[in-house]
Image (tube, rainbow, N blue to C red):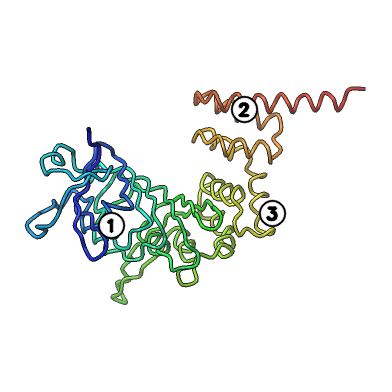
């Protein structure tokens, strides 16, 4: 039987620590269990290309396949290690309690991460060098402490976060960076923060995310961030209105109406048919608006978008003709 994925495991207490991950896939899906025990920890530098596994300190380590079959070292060695630039997507299990230090060090092509908020023990520098991460899915147990704030602090680039709690929310966290400027006369360094991403990452009380505080920052993001990001943020909140008050729903909707053409063109460019469908159903587009968006869709070769927009324009034209027919 062909083996696509193998895990090097070590028993620790009642759980399993993953020491090495090998697979034919660039998606690493860490299992809930290895054999009959839950996977509770990932070893330091697990997915980093900068440190290789050394079996001298782990005499009891063993290989197991994704189907739960024990493997020989020779069988596992036929699979490539998932490390560094190889890793593009990572899924972590609900059983996981600990991620070792620098576990994802310099995984520069990693883009998507899915995890559970109950994984609370994150070692130093886990996400160091992971500048390409753009999408984060967090399954949140709202009755317990959460690691979400800690993860957001590690990842300072723009992030699209799917918050999967009692209900689902889609949140955009803008990037921010800090710049140290020398004040020579005073002989001190002054740290300046650029971008409003830090404000958004502080929308917590202890470890519990505060949706109302997140929404209250909308005036800041309108001033400091590009239109494309602001429309994405507004769409995310209004399409998945978990803990969204009527006041902020109205503000997001007003912004989308004012920037309707830009929002639709961006949905076309990103081939996001869910966003485009929602916009055409909830926002009034005039004939000239639709013409601009259809031209964008044609240039991009996005035929599903062209079809949707042409149908929308046809329905709108039919309504106007009936309205003036005497």
Outermost residue to the front:
36
Q: Is residue 237 above or below residue 26?
A: below
Label 1: few (<14), some (14–19) or many (≥20) C-alpha neighbours in 10 Å: some
**Outermost residue to the left:** 56
- On residue 37, the disc is 1
Which residue occupies 39% across, 54% down? Answer: 115
Q: Is residue 249 above or below residue 192?
A: above
Look at the picture and state if 80 lies above or below 290: below
Q: Quadrant of the N terminus?
A: top left
Q: Which residue occupies the extreme bottom position in the image?
A: 186
Q: Residue at x 55, y 61 (%)?
A: 214
Q: Is residue 83 visible?
A: no
Percent x, y of residue 176: 41, 58
Mark-to-mark CA distance, 1 and 3: 50 Å
* Helix, strand or loop at mark 1: strand
Distance from the alpha carbon under mark 2 to that under mark 1: 50 Å
Q: Name the front one of labels 2 and 1.
A: 1
Please report whichever mark, 1 or 3, sits nearer to the chain's N-terminal start: 1
Do callouts 2 and 1 mark residues in contact (Cβ within 8 Å)? no
Of mark 2 and mark 1, the one earlier in the sequence is 1
* Residue under the point 52% across and 26% down: 302
Give 236 or 2, whichever is nearer the viewer. Answer: 2
Question: For residue 246, which quarter of the picture?
Answer: bottom right
- Left or right for 213, reference 180: right
Q: Which mark is residue 308?
A: 2
Which percent across, then down, holds residue 27?
31, 41
SS for dot 3: helix
Q: Give SS at disc 2.
A: helix
Q: Position of residue 148 (x, y in %)?
A: 42, 61
Provide the residue designation for mark 3.
250
């Amino acid at each position: 039987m062909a083996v696509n994925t193998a895990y090097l495991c070590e028993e620790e207490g009642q759980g399993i620590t993953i020491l090495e991950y090998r697979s034919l896939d660039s998606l690493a899906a860490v299992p809930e269990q290895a054999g009959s025990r839950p996977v509770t920890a990932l070893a330091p530098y697990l997915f980093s290309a900068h440190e290789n596994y050394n079996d001298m300190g782990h005499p009891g380590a063993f290989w197991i396949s994704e189907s739960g079959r024990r493997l020989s070292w020779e069988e596992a060695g036929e699979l490539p290690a998932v490390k560094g630039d190889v890793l593009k997507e990572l899924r972590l299990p609900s059983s996981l309690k600990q991620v070792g230090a620098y576990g994802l060090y310099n995984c520069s092509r990693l883009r998507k991460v899915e995890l559970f908020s109950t994984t609370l023990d994150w070692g130093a520098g886990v996400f160091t060098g992971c500048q390409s991460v753009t999408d984060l899915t967090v399954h949140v147990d709202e009755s317990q402490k959460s690691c979400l704030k800690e993860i957001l602090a590690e990842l300072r680039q723009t992030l699209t976060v799917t918050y999967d709690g009692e209900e689902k929310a889609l949140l955009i966290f803008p990037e921010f960076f800090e710049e140290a400027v020398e004040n020579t006369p005073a002989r001190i360094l002054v740290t300046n923060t650029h971008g409003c991403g830090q404000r958004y990452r502080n929308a917590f009380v202890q470890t519990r995310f505060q949706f109302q505080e997140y929404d209250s920052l909308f005036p800041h993001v309108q001033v400091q961030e590009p239109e494309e990001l602001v429309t994405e943020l507004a769409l995310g909140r209004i399409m998945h209105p978990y803990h969204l008050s009527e006041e902020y729903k109205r503000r997001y909707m007003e912004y989308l109406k004012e920037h309707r053409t830009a929002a639709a063109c961006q949905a076309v460019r990103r081939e996001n048919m869910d966003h485009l469908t929602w916009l055409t159903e909830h926002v009034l587009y005039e004939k000239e608006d639709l013409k601009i968006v259809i031209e964008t869709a044609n240039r991009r070769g996005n035929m599903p978008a062209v079809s949707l927009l042409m149908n929308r324009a046809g329905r709108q034209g039919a309504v106007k003709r009936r309205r003036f027919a005497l």
